[in-house]
Structures are given as structure tokens and as C-alpha cells.
Amino acid sequence: MRAATVTDPTTLGLATWTARAQSHAARVDAATAAHRERRARGEAHPVEDFLFTYYGTTPAQLRRWHPGPGVRLEDAEALDRASWRHYRVVDGAVELDVAAFVAARGRAVEFVRRLLSATVSRPARLGCFGLHEWAMVYRADDGDVRHDRVPLRLGRAGTDEVVERQRITCSHFDAFRFFTPEAVSRNAIQPTRESQVALEQPGCLHAGMDTYKWATKLSPLVPSELAMDCFDLASQIRRLDMEASPYDLSAWGVEPVRIETAAGRTAYAERQRAFAERSNALRHRLIEVLDTVAP
């Protein structure tokens, strides 16, 4: 993979780009304030911590503003930006060194582009009803439940009964790999890491949240405003993911989407469809960025 040539880069003056960087930092600060305050107190949140513990990007890393490819920042050397990894000085301005980034991360860029392109090419499948979370606790011992300090809404037997009555159709490997051994054979699909590109589809909530993962994994190539748009969507998807889960999250102010009922499954699918459309819009934007380094 080689870096595409940006023939007419956009040059931003110091006042312009520092204002954008400050606006981005304020947006991140507002979005992560509750998490940072809980962390300072040593408190965990079973819904909101996921975006930081599973995906691994810290608020401080998210706060660092990157303009993406084809943008030159005037007077950036004075603010130490020239020393950041994958940046370079050109004609007294600082820009992303696309060639250096591709040399270091080209295989990741190629994989993510293939994955996102394959995902947007498929229709959204809306029949999973969030049962992946139920399959993660199916017939599990108490010590093996992921959120072992959060009670189950229907109790152990009631939770297992829901899994046994419903058809599980999880297509996302990074959800499927957390299924209990007893739940694995109940899944109509047996996803693997190798089949990820072939199976990923936009109706999957975890695939929607993963737009945030890909945006941050490919930093600083992906503009920070786009990364935060992905973060915001992932936060909202995570809320539905846990509302539809078997856990009783009333202590955290989370009302359940009762997917064990017909009405609950209808409500879930309606929101799932909207998230599929929004995540596809973000995928297209990510693909546009990745196309700047396409062969």
C-alpha cells in the first residue's frame, strides 16, 4: 500500500486550528467527565466504562486533536506538535506524514477498509435481539459472569430459559468469543476472526460500536472530529446493548428493553435499524479517509 499524494493541502492558521483543537478538547471533556469523576473515586459503571476498558483509548488520548491527512498547521512547531509521532514539518508548517503512517500501519489500514466496505455492502440483519449478552451468562457459574456484581433481571433459571427459547444469530466474533461453552453450539453462526470480513453486517450493535474502535486505532490518520462522532454513537449503542441485556441495571438508572417479550423485541429492532443507518454513515466517512492512502 502506498500513500496517495495530496496535491493541494489545506493550510490552517494558528488561531483557526488551535480553536478547533480547543473545541475538540472541550467536547471530549464533556463526554468523559462522568467517567473521569468515577475513576477518581474508584467507582465502576457497568454500562459506561466499556468504551474505555474494552476499547482501551483513554480520555487523554481521545482529547488530543488530529486534523487528518491533507491539512497543514501553521506555527505548530512552537506548540511542539512537530515532535508528535507521524507528523512532519513542511514549509514551516506541520502536517501528518501519511507515508510514515502507512509504512507503520498499512496492513491495519487495508484490513479496516476491507472490513468497513464489506459491512456497508450488506443489508442490516435485525433479528438478533441482543441475545449475545444473554449467551455470555447462559448456565454460567456465579464467578464466571462478566458483571458478577450486577443481578440478573430474571434470575439464573429465567435467563437460561430465554436463551433456550430464542434463536441466537450472533455474527460478531468479538461478542461470540465471550459466549459460555454451553451457549456456543446454540448460535446459528460460528464466527471466527478469519471470517470477520465475510460476516460483519451493519445491524450488529457491536459492529456499530466498533466504528469507534477503528477510528481510534487508526489515529492520527482519522480526524478527531470523526473519531468523536464515532464515540458518541458507540456510547448510545452501548446503552441499548445493556438495556437489552439480562442484567438488572436499575441501580444505575437503566430501564430494560425486555427482549424476552414480543414488544421488547420490536422496540429493540426499531432502534437497531436506526443505529445501522447511522453507523453506515460513519463507515462511509471512515472509508473516505482511508481512501486517501489507498493504493
Image (cartoon, rainbow, N blue to C red):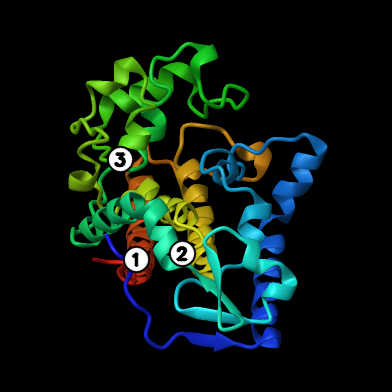
Q: Residue at x 54, y 70 (%)?
A: 225
Task: Please state, as top left, top right, bottom left or bottom right, where the C terminus lies in the image.
Answer: bottom left
Q: Taking 277 as reference, is 8 above or below it?
A: below
Helix, strand or loop under label 3: loop
Work out whether mark 3 precedes mark 1 in sequence or the reverse, and give the earlier one: 3
- Residue 260 location (% of width, % of height): 37, 36
Q: In the image, is 145 to the left or to the right of 282?
A: right
What distance separates the C-alpha of mark 3 from that of mark 2? 26 Å
Q: Taking 77 as reference, is 216 above or below it?
A: above
Q: For this rendering, which residue is in front, 230 or 272?
A: 230
**Disc number at residue 221?**
2
Amino acid under disc 2: Leu
Q: Quadrant of residue 255?
A: top right
Dot 2 surroundings within 10 Å: few (below 14), some, or many (20 or more)?
A: many
Q: For this rendering, which residue is in front, 202 or 248?
A: 202
Amino acid under disc 1: Leu
Q: Where does label 1 land, which residue?
A: 290
Dot 1 surroundings within 10 Å: few (below 14), some, or many (20 or more)?
A: some
- Residue 79 location (% of width, % of height): 73, 71
- The reply to whether the C-beta atoms of the residues labelled 3 and 2 are less than 8 Å apart is no
Work out whether mark 1 precedes mark 2 in sequence or the reverse, and give the earlier one: 2
Q: Where does label 3 land, which residue?
A: 172
